[in-house]
Image: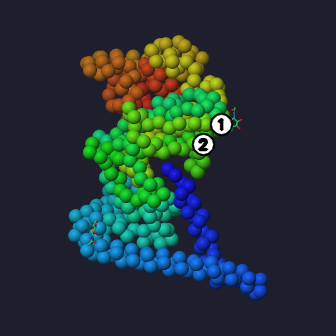
Amino acid sequence: MKFTHSLSSLIFLLPLLAQVHATPLSFKGGVAGNNGGAGGAAAAAAATATSSAAATAASSAASAASSATANNSNPQDSLTLDPKVVATGFENNGQDVPAAGQVASLTSANNFINFCLTVPNLPITNGQQIKTGSCNPAPMGIIAATTNMPSSKFVVPTNGQNFAVNQSFTVQMAVSNLDTGFFVNADENFFAAPQQTGSTGNIQGHSHIVIEAVNSFTDTSPTNPNVFAFFKGLNDPAANGQLTADVTSGLDAGTYRIASINTAANHQPALVSIAQHGALDDMVYFTVGGDGAAGNPFSGSGGAAGSTSASGGAASSAASGQATAASSAASSAAAAATSAASTGKGAQGQNAGKGGNQGAQGQANKGGNNAQGGNAGQQQPGRPKGGSPFKVRRDTKNRL
Ligand SMILES: *[C@@H]1O[C@H](CO)[C@@H](O)[C@H](O)[C@H]1NC(C)=O
Ligand SMILES: *[C@@H]1O[C@H](CO)[C@@H](O)[C@H](O)[C@H]1NC(C)=O
């Protein structure tokens, strides 16, 4: 995304507006008289500009109005809501099924088409990135099916990776279920059209990466989203399933997190059809100018050792807490395998034997997953328990 264009037009407009306002308000006495001439000239020019702009606006409004009338058979031009697209469920505030703490939804009988009238203090978003907030009237659009939920995973950097200060590197991010390469003008069409999907049902969109400094790997303070070390829109289509971005000048020394921001073409966050889903974005932590060890929960031998076997992990990282994790993962793996075997679940036992594949993919439901804890040292070195991260824990109370 580019922010420079809108900013520079704003900078251009501001003095002009200031002049228009200044003329009637501020000139008094002799000194002002001199300036008054200049002010008058400026005002005259501004007035001409304004009146011609007004004329243009009026004529374009007139033509919009006439085309709306002439085209009222085309629902995409009509100013009237077609009854076929009224979401009648929006009339229900949801409190017919009460839940502790649940609040009533706003309701609407007309798809909220005039919602922004309820916040007259806010401008219409109108395709722009209005930093002070705005009200956006575009509908959300096509919601991706569960079979088409986007997902991303960083290939470079990996968790705990270290780069030298100022060292150029290329971020690589694998992405699935996103039709990449679709991006609109971020200054003129921001949030300005509904989310759309392609022929396979994938959201047509693009991604971004953002790198933010954090105090350490164990920092618990929320970051300030206004502050980041690097940002890039990944506008090209993915090549071999991966998007890339060059961090050409590298970064200062520090600890960082890098996150993806997967979006639809008009830059809105990807929307999918269910509330309970895995993260649609990825985030990993890395260092610059570190040795990759001190205070780095991803460093040490847990990862490497874990890649071959759980017992390797335990043996070679005896000094670290990860050894315990790997070892307990291994024993819970063994236990689960035994229990899978004893309950006669042959198929799951086989999966268990294949190591971390299912666990790595986060497929969560079968007993056999615990048996894959043997690779926990590789996949989840920082986790306190082997198989548990992959259990589905649903809050049945809130259904979310
Ligand atoms: C009706 O709309 C179409 C496109 O939406 C436009 O090309 C056409 O000129 C419009 N017709 C009239 C009579 O305004
Ligand atoms: C990194 O680059 C900055 C300028 O971009 C420079 O001030 C700094 O000295 C460099 N540090 C190293 C270690 O190269």
For residue 395, say whether it is visible: no
Out of 137 and 73, give the one closest to the viewer.
Answer: 73
Out of 199 and 53, give the one closest to the viewer.
Answer: 53
Q: Which residue is mark 2?
A: 229
Dot 1: element: loop
**Structural distance between the alpha carbons of marks 1 and 2:** 9 Å
- Which quarter is ligand 1 in? bottom left
x and y percent of residue 65 in the render?
33, 76
x and y percent of residue 217 in the render?
59, 34
Dot 2: element: loop
Residue 203 to residue 254: above or below: below
For residue 188, say whether it is visible: yes
Marks 1 and 2 close (CB-CB < 8 Å):
yes
Label 1 neighbour load within 10 Å: few <14, some 14-19, many 20+: some
Residue 11 to residue 284: above or below: below
Mark 1: C-beta under 8 Å from nearest atom of ligand 2: yes
Of the residues shown, which amino acid type is indicated by label 1?
Asp
Q: Which residue is mark 1?
A: 252
